[in-house]
Amino acid sequence: MGSSGETGRDGRIVLAAALALSVVAGVASAQCRDDRVTVQGEFGRANFTVQVADDARERAQGLMNVPQMPTMTGMLFAYEAPQHATFWMHNTLIPLDMLFADPTGVIRTVHSNSVPMDDTTIDGGQGIQYVLEINGGLADRLGIKAGDVIQHPSLGPDAVLACGG
C-alpha cells in the first residue's frame, strides 16, 4: 500500500511540474506576437505594443504626422538585411528614442530624444536590421542601453531572444 501512495504522490508532482512548464511556455509564446516587441537588459524586461513597418512604403511613412503616442507603444522598422541605418524626423511631431539593433536583436545604438520636425540625419550605424522607435526619453527612464536585446517574431532563429523553438 505504501508504494502505491508514493506513486500517486510522484505522479501528482510530475503532473504539477508539467503544468508549470506549460504555463511558462505559454507566457513565453504570448510575448512573441507580431504586435509586441520585448526589450531585455540589465534593467529587466519591457514590452512595447508596436506597429511593424516592414516594406518600403511603411518605412517611408514611419511615425510622421502622429500627434501623440501612448506610453509603451512604438514602431518596429524591420529590414530584409542588415544595412547602414539612418533616420530623420521630417514631419514627425513627437520626440522619439530610436533603438538600432543588429540581425540577432542586440541593440547597437540608442539615440535619445530626437527633435520633432528636424531633418538632421540620425546615424544608427552599420549592420542594423531593426529599429524600434518609442517615446522620447523612455529609453533613459527604463534604463535601456546599447547591448540590451529585442525580441520579435521577425527576428530569425539566430536571435539572442528567439521566438518559438
Image (tube, grey):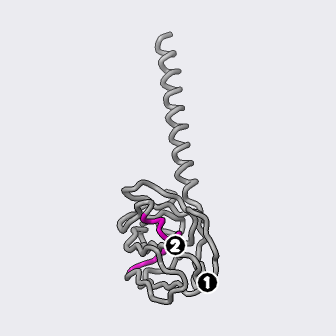
* Residue 78 seen in render: yes
Name the foreground residue: 51 vs 151: 51
**Mark 2 crowdedness (10 Å alpha carbons): few <14, some 14-19, many ≥20:** many
Name the foreground residue: 3 vs 145: 145
Q: Quadrant of residue 121?
A: bottom left
- Residue to which mark 2 is pinned: 133
Q: Would residue 94 appear left or right of 107 to someone viewing this image? A: right
- In the image, what residue occupies the spot 48% across and 72% down? 97
Please say whether residue 154 is one of the residues in the magenta stretch. Answer: no
- Residue to which mark 1 is pinned: 61
Q: Would residue 113 appear left or right of 64 to someone viewing this image? A: left
Badge 1 marks a residue whose secondary structure is helix
Provide the residue span drawn in magenta. 127-140
**Mark 1 crowdedness (10 Å alpha carbons): few <14, some 14-19, many ≥20:** few
- In the image, what residue occupies the spot 52% across and 73% down? 133
Q: Earlier in the sequence, mark 2 or mark 1?
A: 1
Q: Of helix, strand and loop, which mostly describes the magenta segment?
A: strand
Q: Would residue 69 appear left or right of 96 to someone viewing this image? A: right
* Residue 3 higher or lower than 41, as above or below: above
* Residue 111 higher or lower than 160, as above or below: below
- In the image, what residue occupies the spot 61% across and 65% down? 70
Question: Mark 1 is on which residue type?
Answer: Gln
Question: Mark 2 is on which residue type?
Answer: Glu
* Residue 130 seen in render: no
